[in-house]
Amino acid sequence: MTDIVHVPLAGREYDIHVGPGLLRRAGALVGPLLSRPRVAIVTDDRVAGLHLKSLRQGLEAAGISSTCLTLPAGEATKSWPYFERTVDWLLTERIERRDVVVALGGGVIGDLAGFAASVLRRGVRFVQVPTSLLAQVDSSVGGKTGINAARGKNLIGAFHQPSLVLADTDVLSTLPQRDFLAGYGEVVKYGLLGDEEFFQWLEANASSMLAGDEAVRIAAVKRSVEMKAEIVARDETEQGDRALLNLGHTFCHALEAATGYSSRLLHGEGVAIGCALAFDLSARLGLCAREEPSRVRAHLAGMGMKVDLADIGGDLPDAEGLLRLMAQDKKVIDGRLRFVLARGIGRAFVAEDVAPDAVRAVLRDALAARG
Ligand code: GLY
């Protein structure tokens, strides 16, 4: 019961497999890409304990040997020192131009290993084996790779498309509930940005996805990657439509910076709150009905997710402070605030030059509701 979503980028096309048991079948799926039966796996110490053995067995079943680098789990690994270590390890392991690097992990490992593959010998191919819901529906697809800089997240990197993505839905059952829900923030984003019918389906089915319903999980991951694949095929390097994938992210990045990129707020939690605020801003600007932000919040709250600034523990800057953090976002062009706004659920668009006063007012209201 595996679904395949194709990413039709001319010369760089690839398949995303979605379904159970893919780690076990990794050898059969990766094998056709190889010029010799050996791969280099990059993973982290949390994922390694859970899934490395299955992946290696899956590769060995097709006669593929593997060598593995296990890095510490966590965002701090997405940095120059671990990037250097990864590239150096790949060279030590004599990974050649025609070899394949396998990224086994969440967004941190996928971004780091993908970036290392993009520069190694001027570019070797890599396979994404995403193990978090967030990585399955977002970061493993579309070729954004990179590391964080002292000046901000994801400021160093390259577009380097994977050659294959194996989204094994079995691995989702090992995720802590908080991580699962954070990844769900990105799933719901797809419905909100471009597919009201999918959002409606999520309203009806997402709680069984949380409870472990496999068919619902597969369907949700599949629809998410289909939407991502369509958008990436239209606009690989984010000159236009790809920015729609940043719905909720301008608010989210400011909140992540305000909370020090700590466990106070996971990225997907910030995306969910950011989506609710983007709908608040859209309603305030008269772009969508006043009921829309409430509908978004009702669904997120029903899933047991963070939906408001009140759900973030500890101090937050005032509206002015949050606006300043937004002004440092990558998506600010010539000092103008650029947001993804919506004319309704499923009808997002990129708005240039949004009036700071409207954003300030949304933030003030949201902060006031914290009490
Ligand atoms: N995560 C947003 C993108 O891939 O463009």
Image: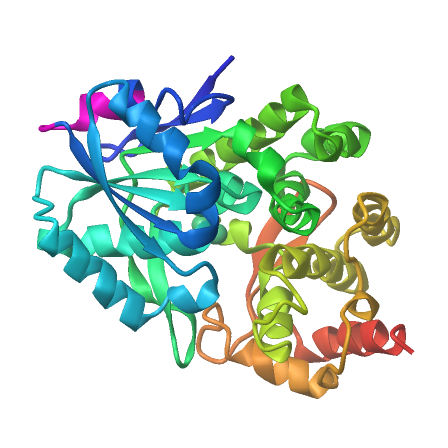
Residue 11, visible in the rendered structure = no
Percent across and percent down for residue 64 are 20, 26
> Who's the residue at 40% across and 27% down the image?
23
Viewer-proximal residue, 7 or 63?
Answer: 63
Viewer-proximal residue, 61 or 350?
Answer: 61
Highlighted magenta segment, given as a residue range: 29-36
The quarter holding residue 233 reads top left
Helix, strand or loop: magenta stretch: helix
The quarter holding residue 141 reads top left
Percent across and percent down for residue 133 are 56, 41
Viewer-proximal residue, 314 or 353?
Answer: 314
Q: Is residue 143 left or right of residue 298?
A: left
Q: Is residue 204 left or right of residue 33?
A: right
Percent across and percent down for residue 328 are 50, 79
Does 31 lie within the magenta span?
yes
Does 231 lie within the magenta span?
no
Q: Is residue 127 left or right of residue 267?
A: left
Percent across and percent down for residue 22 are 42, 24
> Who's the residue at 55% across and 65% down the image?
352
